[in-house]
Amino acid sequence: MTIAPLSYAPAPESVRPTLKSEYGLFIGGRFVEPKSGKTFRTINPATEEALATVSDAGEADVARAVDAARKALPKWSKTRPAERAKILFRIARRIQERSRELAVLESMNGGKPIKESRDEDLPLVAQHFFHHAGWCDKLDYAFAGAKPQPVGVCGQIIPWNFPLLMAAWKLAPALACGNTCVLKPAETTPLTALMLAEILQECGLPDGVVNIVTGGPDAGRAITALAAKGRIDKIAFTGSTEVGKAIARTLAGSGVKLTLELGGKSPNIVFADAALDQAVEGVVSGIWFNQGHVCCAGSRLFVEESIHEDFIDRLRNRMRSLRVGDPLDKNTDVGAINSKAQLATIQRYLKAGSDEGAAKFEVDCALPKKGFWCRPCIFTGVQPSHTIAREEIFGPVLSVMTFRTPEEAVQRANNTTYGLSAGVWTEKAARALEMSNRLNAGVVWLNTFNRFDASAPFGGYKESGFGREGGRQGLSAYVKLGGGR
Ligand code: NAD
């Protein structure tokens, strides 16, 4: 049975964030002009309209931010833990108070649907600050007998897919442990980090404890170069595997503490005994959440051969009801692609999928005239050797394959250079547990997908990186134990 999509009246978000036309760099507790003299325009990818002009930090700017963080370190690292907690709780509450505005800005600058930034990103951002505020005065219990000490100045480089959430994942544990930070947002999505800077000021975070340098890869390289020279004590990077490897090479042998959260090509495995309609929802959220711009996206679907046809029929039906369009419409399921460059990358993969012989099915919907858009699509008849089965696309593209036995499912799922996440759909508890033990992934979701929690460690194996963020495990990246590294 084919389900016709219901037509909905537009439900545009009415809140508009208060934006400045120009932003300096946030260094030493205030916004300053960049010494580089360079700026760039940041746009709304759904409309291509400019939102603000942002500073493009050069080497001297990054060095200045690092100096500010170094200067702030002695006092912040000695601040009473309960006092640090008070400030982090205040930040968490202020984020909640301004969450609507932040959510709208996140959608305007990044292209994600407002229902996701409002109901997923922002609650998690606040939760990360609340969770880590609670750790400030309990570090001696988290690392019992190991005398945890702050690592020092942390250089933190983040991507564009969850801009504010990635900033929270980096800043909250670092601050809870008494470190100071230099954070670099991604070049296409700097605005919510700059609004966060205003919140940090409002909440009385001491000057220089967090510094935010906007810019592109050069600013990121300047951060890692200063780390290699011993001026930064820890680097936390979230982004592509390619850049993660370059950073690892730069820092090899330097003794700088490093965590890398990199790419993924995660399997979502559906057994014949699963609740199929529920699994369809999990597959939809696994690949079309945030337009597929998700490191742990379930971009490889493995369906047990006996239900393949039925399952793909159900999935196609469900796809027909996905609403693609204005990220600020509350009914939108799939928003805009984050940038023109990312759209070009996705289009190259779409061509490779068809050229290599897979069959494409895409949602038949009208797309807005302006902005960067890609229809959600699936490829069936995919072989493990196909490019779209091996490489991270980071877009709304699902590669479907089949398996006959649990053993084959494990082998196929693990046949990847990545190891970030996996999903298993089955009603059999024993099978679920067996699969979760055998899948090489940092997180395995059972009968659900893309669930996050500040208390649960997140991170990868193999080319998905190393180190964990969240929970007690995530704290360990930001402390020296027993006086050592
Ligand atoms: P990217 O690696 O191109 O950029 C990430 C950040 O690094 C940006 O701020 C960028 O300016 C900076 N950068 C670029 N080149 C640099 C260099 N040579 N040295 C230092 N910094 C540099 O990645 P992206 O396209 O922004 O993000 C998408 C990637 O991020 C995907 O591969 C995705 O899987 C990954 N990601 C991983 C996680 C995770 O938790 N594992 C989470 C989100 C995104």
Image (tube, rainbow, N blue to C red):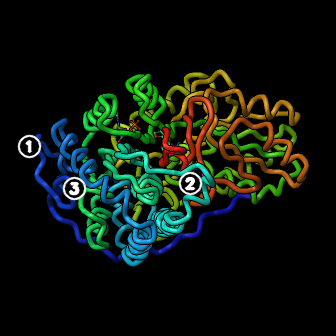
Given residues 214 and 139, the one toward you in this image is 139
Direction from residue 180 to residue 198 in the image, left or right: left
Q: Secondary structure at mark 3?
A: strand
Q: Residue at x 44, y 52 (%)?
A: 170
Q: Which mark is residue 470?
A: 2
The boundaries of the magenta stretch are: 469-473
Magenta stretch containing residue 80, yes or no? no
Q: Amino acid at mark 2?
A: Gly
Magenta part, dominant SS: helix
Q: Residues within 10 Å of mark 2 (few under 14, many from 20)?
A: many
Q: Which mark is residue 296?
A: none
Q: Nearer the viewer, residue 338 or 264?
A: 264
Looking at the image, tell me whether mark 1 or mark 3 is earlier in sequence order. Answer: 3
> Is 472 part of what is drawn in magenta?
yes
Q: Using the numbered discs, state the Cα–Cα distance from disc 3 to disc 2 in whole angstroms.
A: 26 Å
Task: Please name the residue shown 75% across and 54% down the image.
Answer: 279
Q: Which residue is mark 3?
A: 26
For the point 27% across and 52% down, the residue is: 212
Q: Earlier in the sequence, mark 1 or mark 2?
A: 1
| Quarter of the image where ligand 1 sits | top left
From the top left corner, tell me how far across and down residue 48 is, in percent.
27, 52
Q: Earlier in the sequence, mark 3 or mark 2?
A: 3
